[in-house]
Image: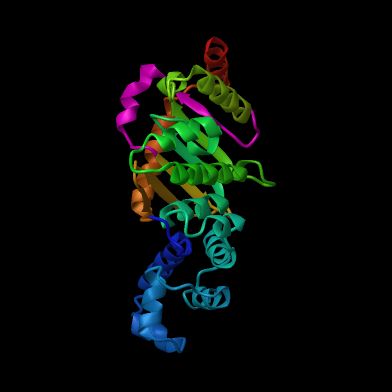
Amino acid sequence: MPSGNAPTVRQRRIGSALRKARDQHNLTVATVARRFGRSQGWLSMVENGLQVIAPEELADLLDFYEVEDGPLRESLLHLATHKPGSWKRTFEYRISAAALDLASLEEDAAEIRTFQPNIIPGLLQVPAYAWKLMAVSPARNSLTARTLVEFRMSRQRVLSRPNPPHYAPIIAETVLGNQVGGDPAILRTQLRRLAEVARLEHVDLRILPSTASEYLSLITPCHLISLRPPGRLTVTVGDYYDKSIFVEDEDEVASHQEIFGLLLSATLSRTASIELIDEIASKS
């Protein structure tokens, strides 16, 4: 459902870090709120990601909790200071809040790791490929599908901007032979796009070979997005047909990172992955 609400992942991530810091000092919400001349309701809303906090107030709270200079503090202040780019104004009221959240995370990312067992990842799709995926849903009309394709293409600019994030997609080998819309021309164009992007210095595209298909059961399609500046803040985004699930719990995210490492250990090397894409593209 389209939404005009601002992305909230950054607020939730800031809030959870503040709550954890408060708990480590065995302080109550009432004590901290009184110290800062704020209501308990305000602090509670901040900790639950329901209230935007000004960078200056965040810095004061971090000082109070003795969060020293370092990756965690830098990442939190970056989230509080950074504003979403022009894509938000363009797609506000036209795209779901979850989709805007995902774009917001990608824009703030130092690293994006993606696992896709069924399709080419969205950041690598060519327009015709994305259109076939969007238009097949009986719940979408052509206008909605066009908006979603346009939004997906706009997200891809994150890979070509100055100082782009490190991008590490893992794609199942079978995906390279899957024709969308029954059109081999779309697949050829898509494979050439993959081969082109895979050669970029900041991209480490890996193919999970069919001989390692047992690894496909480890995790559903997902993204692991580590926020900049490079630090300790990583969010998992689970991909589902009609929604995205954001996981911010540190233990769960750590588990997902471990699983991604196992998947990576079973993939072809970067060079071998590119060679396989080139080989299949030449035959398509």
Residue 212 pos. (x, y %)? 37, 21
Residue under the image location 45 percent in, 89 percent down? 37
Vertical position of residue 63 compared to residue 165: above or below = below
Residue 190 is one of the magenta-drawn residues: no
Q: Please, which colouring scheme is shown?
A: rainbow
Residue under the image location 50 percent in, 69 percent down? 67
Q: Nearer the viewer, residue 12 or 130?
A: 130
Q: Magenta segment range?
A: 199-221
Quarter of the image for residue 204 reads: top right
Residue under the image location 41 percent in, 89 percent down? 34
Residue 269 in sight: no
Residue 129 in sight: yes
Residue 71 pos. (x, y %)? 55, 58
Point out the residue furthest to the front here: 142
Residue under the image location 48 percent in, 21 percent down? 268
Residue 132 pos. (x, y %)? 45, 31
Vertical position of residue 123 compared to residue 63: above or below = above
